[in-house]
Amino acid sequence: NKTVASNFIKNIVVEDLESGNYQQIVTRFPPEPNGYLHIGHAKSIVLNFELADEFKGKTNLRFDDTNPLKEDTEYVESIKEDVKWLGYDWDNLCFASNYFAEIYERAVLLIKKGHAYVDDLSAEQIREYRGTLTAPGKESPYRNRTVEENLELFEQMKQGKFKDGEKVVRAKIDMASPNINMRDPLIYRISYATHHNTGNEWCVYPLYAFAHPLEDAIEGVTHSICTLEFEDQRPFYNWVVEQCEMESRPKQIEFARLNLTNMVMSKRKLKQLVDEGVVDGWDDPRMPTISGLRRKGYTPEAIRTFCREIGVAKSNSLVDAQMLEHFIREDLKLKAPRTMGVIQPLKLVITNYPEGQVEMLEAENNPENPEMGTRQIPFSREIYIERDDFMEDPPKGYHRLFPGNEVRLKHAYFVKCNEVIKDELGQVTEIHCTYDPETKSGSGFTGRKVKGTIHWVEATQSIPAEFRLYEPLILDDDQDEEKSFLENINEHSMEVLQGFVEPNMKTAKSQDKFQFFRHGYFNVDPKHTTEDKIVFNRIVSLKSSFKI
Ligand code: ATP
Ligand code: MG
Ligand code: MG
C-alpha cells in the first residue's frame, strides 16, 4: 500500500484518531452525475480513497444527485467506470437521492423547531434582500409565519400544489450575519423535472448546501473533504448537522482544487465543448476527462502518481500540464514496446538491393528493459522514411539524408543518397540510395561513422496507420471567467496524418501503447481503429524541458 505523503489533512486525521474523536475514518467521493469526471476529480479520488486506505477506514462513492435537471444515468455509469479504472473500490455505493425522505424529515424538524420557514419571495427578491458584504440583508415579510402554517405549506409544496419557483423553504438564521451564506439560505425548492433515480416521486428537492452535510452525517462520514470555495459554507454545514440533530458529526475540510495550464476543468465548460461539437465526445483525447486521458493513452498509474505528487494545499495554484506528461513518460518508459512508424512517408529505393528479396532483421523491443526481448522486422529494396528526414538542400548541421550523405537506418544498414526523383511539380516523390551490406546493425562494423540515425518501415509489408497528433485544446492560461473560454480554442489542436507501421502491429489491440522511435508514445485508439486501419493517438512526445 502506498503511503500518502504528509499533508495538513492527514495531520487532522492522525489527531482525530489519536484523540479518540473518531474510531475509524470514513471519507467519500461525492460527484454530481452531471458530466464525466476530469483530472481534477482524480485528485479528490486519490486523496479520499488513499487517506481512508492508509488508516484502515472506508470510502463511499456517493452520487450527489439533488438536482434533477442536469443529472443523468449515463454520467452515473461513466463515473463508476472511471473510479474503478483509476484503481479504487468503494465500500458503499450511495445516492443522495436515496435519502430524500430522510432529508425531507430533517427539514420538517427544522420548521418544527422554528429554524426554517416557507418563503414566497421570488428568486430575484431573495437575492436583493440578501444584502452584500458591506450591507446587511433584509428579512423576508414571510419570515415570521407560524410553525403550523410553515408545516402546512411545506406539505402542500411536496404535494405539488404550487408552481416551480412559487415557494421555497429557507433556514432561519441571521439576515445580518457577516457570512452571507448564513443569511437564511435556501434549503428546499420546487422542481417538476424527472429525476434520474426517483423519477416523479418528488417535486421538492433539497439544495446542495443543505443536503450535503446531511448526506455525510447519514453515511457516518468523518472527514468531508471538499474544495476551497466551500470554506464559507462551513458554518452552515455545521449548523445543519447540529440543528437537524444528526447523531454523527462529520467535519468539513477544504483543500485547493487542481487547475492545469491550457485546460478548462469545469463540467459545465467541458459539456459545452461536447454539445457544440468542438470535440469528439467526452472521451476526446484532448479533453482533461478521465475517459479522454484514457483514450489518449494515459495509464491509471501515471494519473495516480501525478495526483500524489502535486500534493494537497490550502491555496489555489496552477499546475503545469507538462508535469502530467512527465508521469506518463515515466510510467511507459519500461512498459511500452519500442517500434518504428513513419508518419509522413517518403519512398526510399535501395538500388543495389536485390529485387524481390526480403530479409528479416532483429530489433530489440526496449533497450531500457531487455526482458521485453526482440522481434523480427522485414527489410527489402523499398522502404518508407520520414519526409522530414530528407532535405535536398539542407542547412549546415543537418545530419539526416541529403544527396551524397550517408545515414544509419535503425536496426538495418547504412544507406547513401544518390538520386532524387521528382514529379512535374517539383515535389520529391522518391529517393534512390545504395546500401552497404558490411554495415549491418549488430555486426560490429566499425569501419566508418555516420552522424544521423533515422527510422523506416519496409514498404510492401508495412500496414497503413493513422497518426493523430495533439496540441493543447485551450490556447492560453487565461482562466478569466468573464471571457468565454470558447474564444481561446486552439484551431490546430489535432493533426491527422496517414503513414505506415511495422507489419507485426497487426496484433496490436485497442488501448495498446507503444513508443515509436523518435516520435513519442502512442495509444491504439479504441474508437476509430478499424479492420483496415489502425489509428494511433499520440500520448506525449519523447522529450520535455520539464524537470521535476
Ligand atoms: P465542476 O466544476 O467540474 O463541475 P464540481 O466540484 O462541481 O466540479 P463535483 O461533481 O461536485 O464537481 O465534484 C466531486 C468532487 O470532486 C468534489 O468533492 C469536488 O470538490 C472535487 N473536485 C472537483 N473538481 C476538482 C478539482 N479541480 N480539483 C480537486 N477536486 C475537485
Ligand atoms: Mg460540486
Ligand atoms: Mg458542478
Image (cartoon, rainbow, N blue to C red):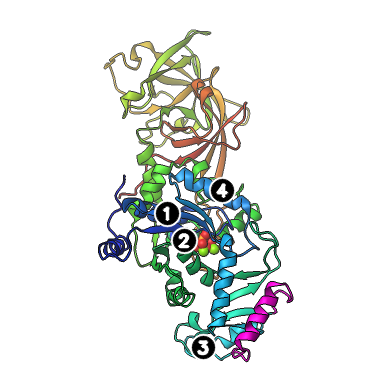
Query: Mark 1 highlights which residue?
Result: 59
Mark with earlier residue (1, 2): 1
- Amino acid, disc 4: Ser
Relative to 363, is 221 above or below? below
Q: Residues within 10 Å of mark 3 (few under 14, many from 20)?
A: many
Task: Please state the horizontal and vertical placement of residue 266, each as a whole percent of the image.
Answer: 53, 60
The Cα–Cα distance between marks 4 and 1, rounded to whole angstroms, is 19 Å
Toward which corner of the image does residue 313 lie, by quadrant? bottom left
**Sequence-first tag of 3 and 4:** 4
Question: Which residue appears at 63% of the width and 81% of the height?
Answer: 151
Check disc 4: other Cα within 10 Å, few if <14, some if 14-19, many if 20+.
some
Amino acid on which the number 2 mark rests in the picture: Glu
Residue 510 placement (x, y as % from top left): 54, 32
Q: Which of 382/405 is in front?
A: 382
Read off the residue under disc 2.
Answer: 219
Residue shown at 51%/32% (left/top)?
343
The answer to whether residue 421 is visible is no
Q: Which residue is mark 4?
A: 78
Q: Is residue 394 left or right of residue 285?
A: left
Q: Please name the amino acid that badge 3 sits on.
A: Met
